[in-house]
Each structure stands twice: as structure tokens, then as C-alpha cells.
Amino acid sequence: MPKAKILIVDDEKDVIERLASFISRKIDCIIEQASSGEEALNKLKGDTFDLAVLDIKMPGLSGIDVITEAIKFTPRTKFLAISAYDSYEIADQALKAGAIDFIPKPQTPEAIELKVKDILSQMGKYEPKQS
């Protein structure tokens, strides 16, 4: 099975690094990082990703802006939205833009890992290890 390719986007570098480190230890995948909506959009235009995990509230292009634009040229990429603004309106906007799910911050890396595994499993890009 080919490795899943994941883009993690957040304007807080430490959040990206912690999440990337945690996910890469738990899931055999390729992870790229972006620290702004503009950088994320450029990466999504230049490469193929299975999943983008992105913060909604960022300076410049928001996560919702990125999803709305990226879904036009990368329809196979799934988007998992995360935000410290845990409100129905934010979640609704993200889902209407095309996110597959919404996770409020703060969230444990384990909760995000489970959601990432679930999404990748549905795409045929992750298989739980048999013990």
C-alpha cells in the first residue's frame, strides 16, 4: 500500500511540529507542513495530498479559504478542519466549504490521530497493524 501524503497547516509552528511528529510515529506516511494559508495553497497546487489537516483561523487566507479554493483543483484531497473557535458556525462553515470533519482545539494528538486514521482507512490509505 502506498504511503499516505498529509499536509499539516497551522500558523503556530509548534502546533505543526508536535502534530507532525506524533502522527508520523503512529502512521506510516509522508508529512509536509505549511505555516500559512497561502503556503498551503501553493503546496496543494504543486503536489498531490491525500489529506490536509488545517487550522481554520490564520492570518491572511483562512483554512476555509484554502478549502474553498483547493477543492476546485484537488478534488481527491480530504480536508480535516481544526480550530480553537469551537462554535457551530465555524464547524458549519468548514463543512460547507468541503471539510470532511471538524475538530475543536485544544485536542489531544491521540484524538486527531484517530480521526486521521479513520479518514485514511476510508480512502484505502491506512490499514491497522495486525498484532
Image (cartoon, grey):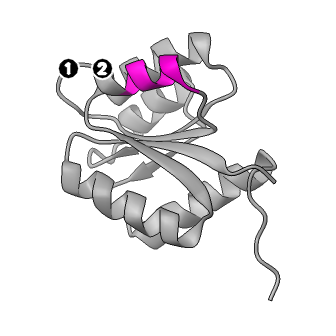
Which residues make up the magenta segment?
Answer: 40-47
- Where residue 26 appears, as percent x and y from the top left, is 56, 71
- Where residue 42 appears, as percent x and y from the top left, is 39, 19
Of tags 2 and 1, which is closer to the observer? 2
Asked if the stretch drawn in magenta spans residue 39, the answer is no
Cβ–Cβ below 8 Å for labels 2 and 1?
yes
Number of the label disc, if any, that sits on residue 60: 1
Which residue, given by chain and number where applicable, does mark 2 sit on? 38
Q: Tag 1 or tag 2, which sits nearer the N-term? A: 2
In this orientation, which residue lies closer to the viewer: 42 or 58? Answer: 42
Magenta stretch, main secondary structure class: helix
Residue drawn at x 81%, y 49% is: 124
- Where residue 63 appears, as percent x and y from the top left, is 36, 29
Asked if the stretch drawn in magenta spans residue 43, the answer is yes
From this viewpoint, which residue is outermost toward the bottom? 131
Residue drawn at x 79%, y 64% is: 127
- Where residue 104 appears, as percent x and y from the top left, is 38, 53
